[in-house]
Image: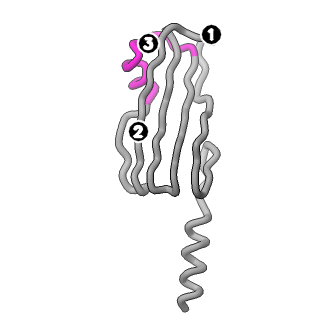
Amino acid sequence: MKKVLALLLVVLFLSGCATPLPVGCLYTEVGMPAAAGEGGHGSKVGIAKSTSILGLIATGDGSIKAAMAAGGITRIKYVDYNAKNILGLYGEYTTTVYGD
């Protein structure tokens, strides 16, 4: 019985839900394009972050709107998204907006 339970726990831990970005079982650190606006580089950068602890508690405002406000941006050139997750224990998600 203990072996069956242990096997089920391992399978549950290693299997995951489909996600919109690459996710590693043990460690994830990826950067992905989130959106494109007018193109070009822009003169300002705004960053917004959110965090997750144990997949149970998530805080912060990682929205494009929050990143625009942080950088004083009114016209978006492009947006990048970065995710870092360690063993599902701690996750940090960053939205970076470039614009004017």
The residue beneath circle 1 is: 40
Residue 77 as seen in the image, left or right of residue 57: right
Q: Residues within 10 Å of mark 3 (few under 14, many from 20)?
A: many
Residue type at mark 3 is Ile
Q: Nearer the viewer, residue 32 or 35?
A: 32
Taking the spot 41% from the left edge, 43% from the top edge, the residue there is 51
Give SS at disc 2. Answer: strand
Taking the spot 42% from the left edge, 57% from the top edge, the residue there is 54
Residue type at mark 1 is Gly
How far across and how far down the image is residue 78, in percent?
57, 19
The residue beneath circle 3 is: 73
| Mark 2 to mark 3 CA distance (whole Å) | 19 Å
Picture layout, residue 3 above or below residue 57: below
31 drawn magenta = no
Q: Residues within 10 Å of mark 2 (few under 14, many from 20)?
A: some
Taking the spot 46% from the left edge, 47% from the top edge, the residue there is 91
User: Upstream in the sequence, badge 1 or badge 2?
Assistant: 1
The residue beneath circle 2 is: 50
Magenta segment, which residues? 63-77
Identify the image quadrant of residue 33. Answer: top right
Give SS at disc 3. Answer: loop
Residue type at mark 2 is Ser
Q: Quadrant for the N terminus, please.
A: bottom right
68 drawn magenta = yes
User: Upstream in the sequence, badge 2 or badge 3?
Assistant: 2
| Mark 1 to mark 3 CA distance (whole Å) | 14 Å
How far across and how far down the image is residue 35, in percent?
59, 25
Q: Residues within 10 Å of mark 1 (few under 14, many from 20)?
A: few
Give SS at disc 1. Answer: loop
How far across and how far down the image is residue 65, in percent?
41, 23
Tally of marks: 3
How far across and how far down the image is residue 72, in percent?
39, 12
